[in-house]
C-alpha cells in the first residue's frame, strides 16, 4: 500500500521506501533499507528526527555542486552517516527547471521533459554519482537514501536502474516511478515547484504546463530507458559499460537487498 511506503514529513517531499517488490527468480526486495526523496533543504527538526529513526547511514545526493551550494540539505546533529556525491556542475538546474525556459504550453513542457530524460543516462554529474550509489549498495548492509531536488527525475532514473539490476519487473519499476504523482502532498509540491519555475522564468507558464514539469509521466522514463537500450541493449549492459558495475557487485547487491 502507498501509505506503507510513504513517510509523511513537513518539509521533505516524496520520501518513500522503494523496496518490497518481488524480483525475477523468486524473493523480494527488503523493506526499510532503500529510501528515496526530494531534497532536505526545508526539513524541520521533527522531519530530521523521523529520518534519523530509519537508521540511514548512506545518503546519495544526485545534485551538482552548484545546486548543493545554493541549497544545502539539513542534517540532524546526530547524523553520522556518509553523504556521497561525485562533484560536477549542473548549471544549477534540476531537469524540470531545465525544461521550463520560456512561455511554454503543456505539449512543449512534455516534449522538453522527454528530451531531457533521453539525455539523462549520460549526464556527467549524474553518471559519476550513480557509480558511487551502486558501489555503496554493493558494499554497505545498512539503509540508504537517494535524492535530488524534487526526488522524481534523476532519482526516478536512479531507482529504475537499481530496480532492474535487482530483478524487479518493469511493470513494478514503472509503478514505483509513477507513485511520485500520488505520494504525499502532491498539490503542495507542485505549487512549490511552480513558484520556483515562475520566479526563474516569469509567470507566463500555465498551470497545466507546470503540472507536466512537476509530475512524472511514463513517456519520460521510457525516453531514458530507450537511450539505454539503444546503446547498451539493457540496463545491466548500460550499468557495466557506463557505471563501472561488475557482476560481482550485482551479486553483492542481491545478497544484501533480496530476501
Image (spheres, rainbow, N blue to C red):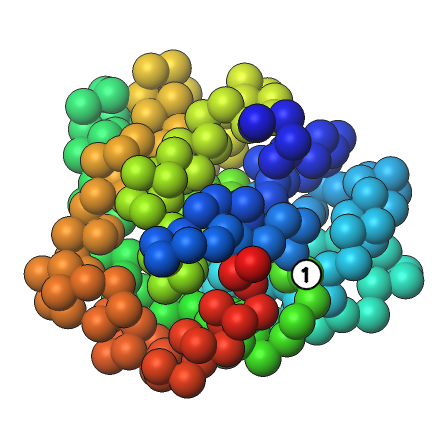
Q: Quadrant of residue 251?
A: bottom left
Q: Which residue is mark 1?
A: 143
Residue 167 vs residue 131, the one in the foreground: 167
Tell me the quarter of the image containing the C terminus.
Answer: bottom right
Label 1 element class: loop
**Residue located at (14% from left, 59% from top):** 229
Tell me the quarter of the image containing the N terminus.
Answer: top right
Residue 116 visible somewhere in the drawing: no
Q: Report the label total.
A: 1
Q: Quadrant of residue 119?
A: bottom left
**Residue located at (64% from left, 61% from top):** 144
Vertical side of 39 occupied by 250: above or below: below
Q: Position of residue 33 (x, y in %)?
A: 64, 56
Q: Position of residue 49 (x, y in %)?
A: 87, 46
Q: Position of residue 201 (x, y in %)?
A: 39, 33
The residue sitting at the front extreme is 26
**Residue located at (42% from left, 54% from top):** 26
Does residue 127 appear left or right of residue 140 in this picture? Answer: left
Does residue 145 appear left or right of residue 190 in this picture? Answer: right
Does residue 164 appear left or right of residue 34 in this picture? Answer: left
Amino acid at each position: 500500500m502507498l501509505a506503507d511506503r510513504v513517510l509523511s514529513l513537513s518539509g521533505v517531499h516524496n520520501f518513500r521506501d522503494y523496496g518490497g517488490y518481488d524480483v525475477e527468480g523468486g524473493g523480494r526486495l527488503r523493506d526499510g533499507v532503500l529510501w528515496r526523496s526530494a531534497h532536505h533543504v526545508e526539513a524541520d527538526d521533527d522531519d530530521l528526527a523521523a529520518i534519523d529513526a530509519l537508521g540511514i547511514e548512506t545518503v546519495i545526493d544526485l545534485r551538482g555542486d552548484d545546486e548543493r551550494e545554493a541549497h544545502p540539505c539539513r542534517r540532524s546533529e546526530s547524523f553520522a552517516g556518509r553523504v556521497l556525491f561525485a562533484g560536477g556542475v549542473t548549471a544549477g538546474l534540476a531537469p524540470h527547471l531545465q525544461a521550463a525556459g520560456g512561455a511554454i504550453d503543456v505539449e512543449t513542457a512534455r516534449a522538453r521533459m522527454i528530451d531531457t530524460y533521453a539525455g539523462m543516462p549520460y549526464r556527467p554529474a549524474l553518471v559519476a554519482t550513480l557509480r558511487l550509489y551502486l558501489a555503496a549498495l554493493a558494499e554497505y548492509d545498512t539503509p540508504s537514501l537517494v535524492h535530488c531536488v524534487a526526488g522524481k527525475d534523476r532519482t526516478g532514473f536512479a531507482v529504475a536502474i537499481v530496480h532492474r539490476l535487482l530483478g524487479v519487473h518493469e511493470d513494478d519499476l514503472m509503478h514505483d516511478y509513477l507513485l511520485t504523482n500520488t505520494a504525499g502532498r502532491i498539490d503542495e509540491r507542485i505549487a512549490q515547484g511552480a513558484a520556483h519555475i515562475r520566479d526563474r522564468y516569469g509567470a507566463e507558464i500555465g498551470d497545466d504546463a507546470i503540472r507536466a514539469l512537476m509530475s512524472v509521466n511514463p513517456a519520460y522514463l521510457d525516453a531514458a530507458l530507450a537511450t539505454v537500450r539503444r546503446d547498451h541493449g539493457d540496463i545491466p549492459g548500460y550499468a557495466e559499460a557506463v557505471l563501472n558495475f561488475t557482476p560481482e557487485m550485482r551479486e553483492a547487491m542481491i545478497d544484501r537487498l533480496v530476501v
